[in-house]
Each structure stands twice: as C-alpha cells, then as structure tokens.
Image (cartoon, rainbow, N blue to C red):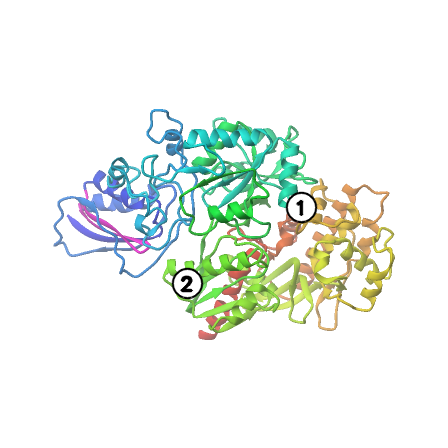
Amino acid sequence: MQCVRIRLSGHVQGVGFRPFVYRLARAHEIKGHVQNQLGEVSIVAHGSADALSRFESELISKAPPLSRPAVTLSEVCDDDFEFDDFEIIASCNDAEAHIFVPPDYFMCDDCRAELLDPDDRRFNYPFINCTQCGPRYTLIESLPYDRPNTSMKDFPLCAACNAEYTDPLDRRFHAEPIACPVCGPALQLEGSDATGTEEILDTAIQELRNAGIVAVKGIGGYHLICDAMNDAAVANLRQRKQRPDKPLAVMFPLSGDDGLDALRHHARLEECEARLIRSPARPIVLLRKSTAYSLAKNIAPGLGEIGAFLPYSPLHSLLLDRFGGPLVATSGNISGEPVLTDNDEASNRLNKIADAFVHHNRPIVRPADDSVFRRIDAAMRPLRLGRGSAPVELAMPWHQSEPILAVGGHMKGALAISWDDRVVISPHIGEMDSPRSLAVFEQIATDLQELYGVQAQAIVCDAHGGYTTHRWAKKHPLPVTTVWHHEAHASAVAAEFALPGQWLVFTWDGVGLGEDGTLWGGEALLGNAGNWRRVCSQRAFRLPGGERAGREPWRSAAALFWEAGLDWANSPDDSGLLEASWRARLNSPVTTAAGRLFDAAAAIICGPMITSFEAQGPMILESLCRQQRAPVAMPLHADSDGILRGDWQPLLARISDESVSRQERAELFHSSMAQLLVDQAIAVSDKHDIQQVGLAGGVFQNRVLTEQVCSLLGGAGFKVLLPRQLPCNDAAICYGQAAHVAAQNGRKES
C-alpha cells in the first residue's frame, strides 16, 4: 500500500473534474481526498501501487470532455494518513494561485435530452445545465469557482437541486449555475402580460412569424433575431440597426442524426467545419452557400458565404425548435460596441430596433460576443474570439519578470494580461471608439487581473497616439511601453509557434502607424519576436481624405491612378477637387497598405463604391474568384534604405479592362498579389537565412489569397505558418505586444 500526492493544473475548474476524480477513486478502491486549490486540483490518494498507477493514468486518459488536465506533481508521501473513504473536501483559498477561467459552454446532449423530456422536472426550462455545460466566464465574479462567487448567488437552491449539487455521484455535483423552475432564473417578456416559459416563448415566436424583431438575452449578451427566410424581416432589421450590408449570422435548428441537416440544405460543410460548428464552443463558422441556398437574399448580399451556428443555450434551442426554421441572430448592440448585457440598458438602447424583448433575471457579469471562425488552408482559424472560445490562455516563450497589461490596438479590441510564462487574452470587446467600448475594456482589464490574482506592473500599447487604448495607457500611472503596430503582428505569430531561427513575417493589413510616420500595411519584417527590421514593402501612395478612404474604396483606386500619372475614367471625383487636394498633399497621408490595394481593386473591378463596413469591397472581390490565374508580373526594386518594394502599377491596366469579366479580373488580382509576396520572400531568402515565413494581418483572412500564398511558398521550399489559436487580424495585437516586450526583456536578462 502507498500514499501519493498528485497535483493537476490546466483546464480543471468548472468542468466537473473533482466529481470525476471522486468516481474514479472509488472505482479503483482508493481512499483519500481531492481539493480545489485556486485553479489547481490537489489529490491525496491511498491504495495499492497498481491501483494508484492506473488511477493516475486515467486521470488524464478518462478526463471529462471539457477538461485539459496536466499532472504537475506526483510524489509518494508519508504513509501515516488514515482515510475511511475518498471524499471531496472544501476548496482552499490560500494556496498559490494557478487560475484557469473557463469559457462559456454549450448545452450538452444529456441536458438537451432532459430539456425535451416531458417527464423531467426541467422540461422546457431555459436555464438547464450541468458540470459539462452552461455559462462560466460570463457569471464568475471571483475565484475559486464556487456558487457564492457567481451571479447565481442570489438564487438559493431548492431541496431537489441541493441534493444533486451535494451528491458526488450526480453529474450536477457542484455545477455552480445549477437551477430549475422552482429555484432558478426565469424569463420575462417586456411589454406583455405573458407569464411562464411556454406563454413567453409562444408570444415571441408569433412575433417572429409576423416578420418582427425580438431581442433575446442569452449567455453573453443579447441577440437581435428575426426570420432568416423572410426578406422583409431582414430588411427591417438592417434598416433599424443601420447595418445595410454587413453579413448577418444565422442560427439553425438542430435536425438529423448529427444536428446539421437543416444547415446542410443552405451551406456546404467540410468535415473540419462540421466538427467545429458542433464543438462545445459552438462558434459562428463561415460556410459556402449551397446550390439549394434559399435564405433571405439580403442575409449576406454579394457574398458566397454565410455565418452559421447552432443553438448553444437551452433558451436558443427552445426558440429554434418552436420556430422550426433558421433565425438571424446578430449581436444585440449598437454597431461596433460590445454586446449589451443589462436588461434596462438593452431596453433603452435597442427600443427602436426590437419589437419585443425576452429578458431573464440571471445577471451577466461581463459580455461575451459570439466567436467567428473560417476554414483557411485546411484549418479552422479564428476571426473573432468570444463566447465559448475565450478567454484564451497561451504559454509565453519568455519568462517575464513582472506582470504586464497589453491593451491592443483600436479595431477589434481585445486585451491581454501576461506574467511568468503565461498570457491570457480577453474575448472580443469591440471597436475602441465609443464610451461603452472603453467602459467594458476597463472592466475586463480589472476583472482578469482580479480573477487570475495578478496585478499589472506595466502597460504596453500601440505606438499610434490617436488610438483610444494608447491615450488610456498614457493616462495610467503605471509605466508605459509602446510597440509598433506591425512589429506586434509579427511578434504574435512568432510567439504562437515559438520556433527557433529567423523569421520573415509578412504583415499585410489596412493601416497601422510605421516607424517613419507613414501608414504601413504591406510589409515584410525580418528577425525574431522583439527584434524586427523591415525588408519589404509596397510602392507608396497617398490616401486622399485619410481615414475616409477606409469606407470609400474609390479614393484608394483614384490615388493609384494619380500616383501612376494616369486618369481613371470611372472616378467619381467629377469636379477634380479631391485630386487637387491630393496634389496639394492636403489630408493625404502616405501609405503602403496592402489592404488599401485590395480596396482599390474592388472599386476598379466592381465599380466605384461607398462601403458600410470594414473590408466590404475586398470581401465582394474575393467572392468572385473561382480559380487561379497567370499573374501579372510586378517589378521589385530596392529603395534608398534597401527596402524591397513591389510596384502595383502594371496591374492597373489589366484590372480596369472592362472587356474582361469581373471574375477573371478579380482572380488575376489575387494571383498577382500572391505571386508578388512569394517573389519578395524568394528575394529576401537569397540574402538572408530564413527558417520560416509567417503571415499576419487582416488581409490574410482572405482565403483565396492566403491559400495561393501558402501553396506558392510551400512549392518554393518555405515553411509557412499562419496563426491558428488567435486571429491574424488586430485581435492578436495585444498578444503580440506582450510577446514583443517579453522577448526583449528575456534577451536583456540572458
């Protein structure tokens, strides 16, 4: 007989790990105890050597599906313990913290079966959950993760729920959000006399069938929902939300053996897409429309994809099952802001959009918008991290001497806290140009530090002085370090993969401030995290109107023609005033941004346009592509600083030739840009030793471009790496900032 002490870290909190250990110990006739110690699980186990060996092995091999445990300690201890049985003892709050904050999970199959069982006491109860499903991040107020530390603390358990909660053999043992119709949260239909779940749901469904819009409070915030088959309902939602073109996500009811039959009618699914859309994270996945696609024509106008997801909460499941068809489910917010979470605030701010409100009285501690993924180069890659996927914890390749708070950029706001060899990235916050975005940013910055027991000693921000996050950091009393935008992009991909040797990272995006004061976005940086130098770029041009060019792509197109000394026949600048201003260098900053080249190509090929959301033109341009074309050769030349610049001018004549179809010109543009990148990589590798090529920046969300780039680079003998755990867009800037500083400090210490 032996006694061993085992400690496990990782994803072992909020996933039913302690009752799993309890059941496993009893199965192996082991005595002792298991205890939660601020993010870790400590086990003292007494039994035969063979039983203990099997027990320790099965702690990993048979762990609950949502857990990801790792054994950090296993040692024989003094055999003077006396145990009568195996038990779960009270959490220890004074142990050294190694916290993991779990994200919110979907409703598991066991709970769904109970939800639909008329004989079950939780039949049709919208807040059913167990240790393997339900909200976590959005209801945890403090750690350890026990019910009194969550927003469920004001819902005392009834006798039946308490019996489940205290029974180690029950799957709801210490399921902190446990509830039932007797003791748990309840729905409320604003402005209606409807009472009870059945009547409230039926009233909401009738509103949807009448082409109405219903605001529904979910796990991480509100959705605005309407009939996805009804053009008028969707048009009404777009008009009221002032969202004329941006694609709307669609939630499909579960049907068929794997739940995906209803979705398959409208979209084509690869195996990796189907697997992810059914995963516990239940994200929105961008899918190609099928030939049988028959949703409202204005769901994703001009695009070949839709954002699709499955119901992930019991409330969503009840709504979809009753409605019997797909529903638009878009973020309940003012566009660009974090999703709304408070009942009164949602009623006040969405009252001109929604015809009805389905509230509930379970407080949402902090917002979590839906995650978004897209298949690119045979892998599912995040475009936005949120409910179900974040917070995200990654290992930091360089040990840090002090905790830091990295505040990210301005678009696609997210922040990171980084300490020791750990970094935690927040869910998506929103665009950082509204008071509500800043308020949520500040709340999450405070919450993450408190939850993880870490107090930042320094702040890292983008070098752009106009960013809200930069201004916030500079007002803070802590010391501040700035990191250039594209160096943060490069450091993010280098840190994620943490490979030895020199990197060449292409950072292609919209615009970000560069070291020379111009707007970069078509660069290639050589080096390692924390130590980069620009070796490639694009031929520079000036953006007429500055930031306005981001929403009016024709300005970028006109500027390319003017820069090349040419006239653009389709230019909307009939008066010539904009060109005169451009030539006078008034409000016309210099840029090398690849994103603005894609904007220009979209305006030239698809017609002059004013867009209503970021990257609308390039998304339409990408959707036209069907095949790869022979590229237009774009010359490379070294400038006075030795930076190798690609010249886009030869493209202008070809992509503006209206005798050629839009599809062919779109394909030509993508193939030419991909070839330009590869030509630059080959030219740099002729002079420098490169172990791997990285791709970072929002332009690489473009599947057509990125897959061609990866194929061409691979064919040329390069090892190519594209982020998989974090988005390649500005959502990863905070991680890159933290990695950049950690790498620099690590080199100084060594």
- Residue 421 tag number: 2
Q: Which residues are magenta?
A: 30-48
Q: Quadrant of residue 510?
A: bottom right
Q: Position of residue 138 (x, y in %)?
A: 42, 49
Neighbour tally class for label 2: few under 14, some 14-19, many 20 plus, Cα within 10 Å: some
Disc 1, disc 2: CB below 8 Å?
no
Q: Quadrant of residue 176?
A: top left
Circle 2 SS class = strand
Q: Is residue 43 magenta?
A: yes
Residue 502 visible in this rendered orientation of the protein: no
Q: Which residue occupies the foreground of this view, 369 or 265?
A: 369
* For residue 558, side relative to residue 670 (left or right): right
Q: Earlier in the sequence, mark 1 or mark 2?
A: 2
**Considering the image in quadrants, where does the C terminus appear?**
bottom left
The residue that label 1 is drawn on is 704
Q: Position of residue 626 (x, y in %)?
A: 71, 40
Residue drawn at the location 45% of the way across and 62% of the way down: 417
Relative vertical location of residue 229 with respect to residue 8 in this rendering, above or below: above
Q: Position of residue 408 (x, y in %)?
A: 54, 61
Q: Position of residue 451 (x, y in %)?
A: 38, 58
Q: Is residue 42 magenta?
A: yes
